[in-house]
Structures are given as C-alpha cells and as structure tokens.
Image (cartoon, rainbow, N blue to C red):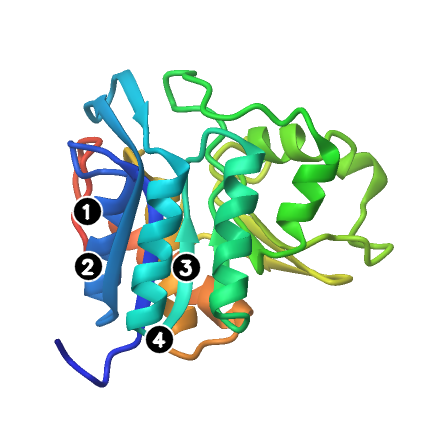
Amino acid sequence: MSTNRPFALSIAGFDPSGGAGVLADVKTFEQHQVNGFAINTANTIQTDNMFYEIQWTDLSFVIRSIETLFLSYEITTVKIGIVPSLYYLNRILSSIKLLSPMTKIVWDPVLKSSTKFEFIELNDDLLLNEALSKIDLITPNYDEIMMLFPDFVSEKPWVKNELPSAILLKGGHNEEALGTDYLFMNSTVTELLPTNINFQPKHGSGCVLSSAIAANLALGHNLKSACIEAKIYIEKYLSSSSTLIGHHYV
C-alpha cells in the first residue's frame, strides 16, 4: 500500500450495482489517488433503478470496525452515508472523534432512496443537533434540507451564523437554478455554478459527490476548494454515459 497517499474511510451501505454506497465511494477515492477504506452500515438488494430490501449492520460491529481501522491507520477524512437512526449516527461520530479528533467528517444525509424507501427518521432535534456539531460538512439536496431544517429558507440561519455545520446544498432538485450548488459556511454563501445543465441523471451521484469532497479534503484542500473540485468531478461523472450507471474519471 502506498505510503504517500492519504487514507479516507467510507461508512455507508453496500449497493451491489456499484453505483452508490461504499463501492461508489471507494471508486471515487481511488480515482483521486486516495487510499480508500470502507465499513458497511447495511447490505442492500437494489439495482440502478429499483430498491428492494435492506439489512442493517449491527452497531457494535460497525464500532469495532471503526476502532480497528483508526488504531491501525491515520485516517484523514470520513464520508458517512445511510444510517438507520440518529442514535446510530451519533455513536459512529463519537467513536471517530474519540479516536481521531482532527479527522474531517462529511455526511451525505440520504434520508430516502430515489424510489422513496425511507432510511432514517429525523424525530429528535437534540440528537440531530448533537450529530451535526461533530460533522464538518453535510451535503443535502433540496428535499433533504427541508427535512433536516424545515425553516431553512425562511429563517436563513447562515445570516445569523447559526449553522451547526457547513452545508453544501446540492442543486439537482432545484428547478429554479438547476445544477447550482450553494456552500454555506459560517455566515458566508458561495454559489457553485454548473458548466451546463444537460447532464444525464446517475444512480448514486450524491454518494460520488460527497466522497469526492472527502477525497479532496484528504488531499489537503480546504472545504471550499474541495467542493469546487468535487463539482468538476461529478459533472464528468454525470456526462460519462447515457444510462443511470456512470463511469469514474478524474
């Protein structure tokens, strides 16, 4: 294993089609010349266009896996995907922070599958805020941001510097500004414009974007630069084929 590559870890679900979850994340890490590790939060039965079944991984098994990897390697960044509960997420986050307080954490809050299968219920604001306080960046789309923060648009918490973590609001579901992402950090907002809006939808594109950000953070980019570079990567991915299965390029 190369000693001059940083280490990044994906903690997410296993998608046998390879378009999403840990397989997509590790493909993305490798394309960025980052050593990619993976821990499964769930096994799933799915294809690129249908979700059938999920089997969650026992939390204690996930925690032991985290401890084993962190005690063996200097892991720079972690990308987290699907989890079954906020308690489960908080246990993962607390374990990481205890073992490596400086590790950067990106959470792609996949709350529902594209076929509307619900992964997690957001029924405890205290647990949600506790989790977000340990995370460096979350990457919701417009549907997810309204589930996480129902008053996000009306209250504008970034203006009051009240964001619990940095937020990259993805523009794929915003018909008014399709493909335009917004990075909220503290009280600043950075608009990330698309090069065009004629990309083909891809299964797992949110996973790829968040893992590309994690990879760039592992390579030493600051958060803004990591998001800008990841947008370039995801646009290449979205334009890589005419099907829902994309191809990875740098």
Residue on which the image places disc 2: 249
Counting from the top left corner in percent of width and height, residue 176 is at 60, 34
Residue on which the image places disc 4: 74
Cβ atoms under marks 1 and 3 closer than 8 Å = no
Residue 223's place in the image compared with 79, above or below, is below
Marks 3/2: CA–CA distance: 21 Å
Marks 1/3: CA–CA distance: 26 Å
Q: Quadrant of the N terminus?
A: bottom left
Q: Residues within 10 Å of mark 2 (few under 14, many from 20)?
A: some
Q: Which mark is residue 78?
A: 3
Marks 4/3: CA–CA distance: 11 Å
Marks counted in the figure total 4
Q: Residues within 10 Å of mark 4 (few under 14, many from 20)?
A: few
Marks 4/2: CA–CA distance: 26 Å
In the image: residue 233, left or right of residue 177: left
Sequence-first tag of 3 and 2: 3
Counting from the top left corner in percent of width and height, residue 134 is at 61, 56
Q: Amino acid at mark 4?
A: Glu
Residue on which the image places disc 1: 240
Q: Which of the two residues, 104 or 31, is positioned nearer the viewer here?
A: 104
Sequence-first tag of 2 and 1: 1
Cβ atoms under marks 2 and 1 closer than 8 Å = yes
